[in-house]
Image (cartoon, rainbow, N blue to C red):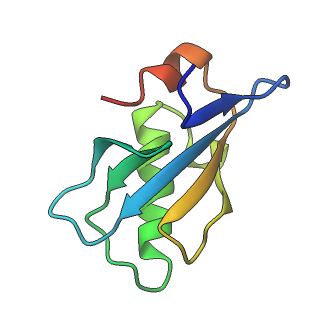
């Protein structure tokens, strides 16, 4: 198991991500320490980057947006995202 995600006993998962808002395009950019680095095209204004992050994670895991929530890091680049309904294989395949 990678350091950037944890699978809970109830089937949920938490992802530790490092976000780079204002990038040219939204994409996974590999690891940043013990976090998955995600570049976001959205600016870090009025929660737009947070919403873009949650939509990106949901789309990449083929889940509804409601299955992905931001647990911590609302104003930080270091964030913890909670995912419900994804398999461990889907989570592991999330990173490039």
| In-front residue for pair 37/68 | 37
Identity of the residue furthest to the top in this view:
89
Tally the marks.
Answer: 0
Residue 19 drawn above or below residue 2 = below
Seen at 43% across and 74% down, the residue is 48
Q: Nearer the viewer, residue 61 or 35?
A: 35
Q: Position of residue 45 (x, y in %)?
A: 41, 85
Residue furthest to the left in view is 24
Left or right, 23 with respect to 88, comes to: left
Q: Position of residue 37 (x, y in %)?
A: 37, 49
Would residue 51 be found to the left or right of residue 66 on screen?
left
* Horizontal and vertical percent position of residue 90: 50, 20
User: Where's residue 57, x and y in %?
Assistant: 47, 44
Front residue (pair 24, 63) = 24
Query: Residue at horizontal 49%, vertical 21%?
Result: 92
16 and 93: which one is in front? 16
**Quarter occupied by the C terminus:** top left
Left or right: 24, with 45 as reference point: left
**Relative to 27, residue 45 above or below:** below
Furthest residue to the right?
A: 10
Q: Quadrant of residue 49?
A: bottom left
Q: Residue furthest front?
A: 33
**38 sits to left or right of 57:** left
Point 85% across, 25% down: residue: 10
Which quarter of the picture shows residue 3? top right
Q: On screen, 64 above or below 38?
A: above
What's the residue at 51%, 54% (across, down)? 54
> Which quadrant would the N terminus be assigned to in this image?
top right
The answer to which image quadrant residue 82 occupies is top right
């Amino acid at each position: 198991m990678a350091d950037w995600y944890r699978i809970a006993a109830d089937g949920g998962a938490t992802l530790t991500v490092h976000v780079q808002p204002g990038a040219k395009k939204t994409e996974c950019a590999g690891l940043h320490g013990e976090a998955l680095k995600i570049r976001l095209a959205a600016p870090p204004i009025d929660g737009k980057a947070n919403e873009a992050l949650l939509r990106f994670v949901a789309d990449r895991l083929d889940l509804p947006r409601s299955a992905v929530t931001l647990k911590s890091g609302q104003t930080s680049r270091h964030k913890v995202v909670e995912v419900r309904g994804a398999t461990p294989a889907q989570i592991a395949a999330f990173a490039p």
